Image (cartoon, grey):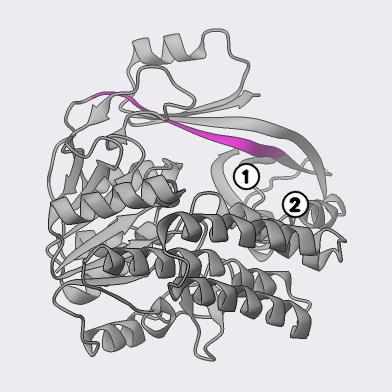
Amino acid sequence: MQIIKFGGSSIKDSVNIKNVTEIIKKQNYLDSIIIVSAIGKTTNKLELIVKNYVENNKDLQNSLLDLEKFHIKITNDLFPKNHKIHSAINLYFKEIASFLKNNKSPNYNFIYDQIIPFGELLSSCILNEYLNLRGINSKLKDVRNLIKTDSYYRNSNVNWALTQKIISNTKFINSITLTQGFIASNEDNFTTTMGREASDYTASIFAYCLNAKSVTIWKDVDGVLNSDPRYFKKPVLIKKMSYDEAIELAFYGASVIHPKTIQPLQKKEIPLFVRSYINPEITGTCISHSTELNPIVPCYILKKNQILISISSLDFSFTINDNTIYILNLIKEHKIKINLTQNSAISLTFCIEDEYNNFDKLLNKLKSNFKIATSKNVNLYTIRNIEKDTMRKFKKDKSVLIEQIFHNTAQYVVIN
């Protein structure tokens, strides 16, 4: 069993869907599970729909219509007029409209998780039908019947025991099983999501439960690069790396691999290949057990739109111990992610990201007991395998607010 994952950019339009189909044919993916993300920027469009719905915005219908037209254009490009895909797409949009009309919950995160997954449901349906149209035997399965989670909407946790039992007892065809990434369901069968960009994680869940031979993730880059080409010049392709190094890079925010992806694969020593759908002839990157980084180069990671917050006691007393526990519990309660921590005798400083827009609420809680200083919209750079010359060149012409070095990893908070 092989587990294959195609990201949203790989199927962003009809041309790319045809290209992915050719890759699947050439790679001879028999006895495999193929996992897909939403098409292109569909998730962004669905997030706008959720926003318009929650805010009772008059643009709600226009945003729905825009998304529907986008998918209809793709199906019109790929399929004949009488194909069943057209009615299937129409039915999905009726389901979205029905939920928006009948929903009674004011919980934003719940609403988000009932709407956003339609991106994956639409893309998997379209690709599955197109594969069969091209003579490739593929069967569509709803991943919500296979992966079970808790009810932590937008960042749910896998119920591994139940998921293992379900997947182990599921019959998969000897050709291709097509399913969705990123989404799952809870014990009440409400849809959940496992975190933004978590389709890679879905692939590793299936690999773990099925003792797969390998996982291959197809991206728009040649493999794992030592830096993001959008922000750094002359990125270098890393041909081989260990699970540990991949976990470190993902932890610090490397966008090519979702942070949760590696651990299930590491437990069963299942190799992960990262390849390019643009240049499929390139072998890409292999992540496996006890593999040294090849080549050994500094790896640069940038996390934008961070918030730097410094918390000091009002009476100049120490912040450690009880105060530290109180502050960390508040941060956890507001679902704020800490990416860097630094402390002195009378202050704690965090570089954080506010994915759930709870920072202002946290700030109000803290202000009653502490002196607060903040800097918004800062950048956090992390450099792995750093050397003195690398540090010197990197810091040149940058306004560094915080510098922190631990072993071979350096982190810098920089004014944007």
Question: From the viewer's perspective, is 230 left or right of 295?
Answer: right
Residue, x 12% and y 58% (percent of image)?
28
Spatial separation of the CA atoms under disc 2 and disc 1: 9 Å
The secondary structure type at the circle numbered 2 is helix
Expressed as whole percent of the image width and height from the top left, the position of residue 98 reads 70, 82
Q: Residue at x 35, y 17 (%)?
A: 234
**Amino acid under disc 2:** Phe
Range drawn in magenta:
297-309
Which residue in the structure is indicated by mark 1?
Answer: 352
Q: Residues within 10 Å of mark 2 (few under 14, many from 20)?
A: some
Circle nearer the N terminus (2, 1)? 1
SS at mark 1?
Answer: strand
In this orientation, does residue 81 appear? yes
- Residue at 43 percent across and 72 percent down: it is 83
Q: Are marks 2 and 1 in contact (CB under 8 Å)?
A: yes
Residue linked to disc 2: 359
Give residue 63's quadrant in the image: bottom right
Question: Residue shown at 78%/36% (left/top)?
Answer: 373
Disc 1 residue crowd, few under 14, some 14–19, many 20+, Cα 10 Å: many
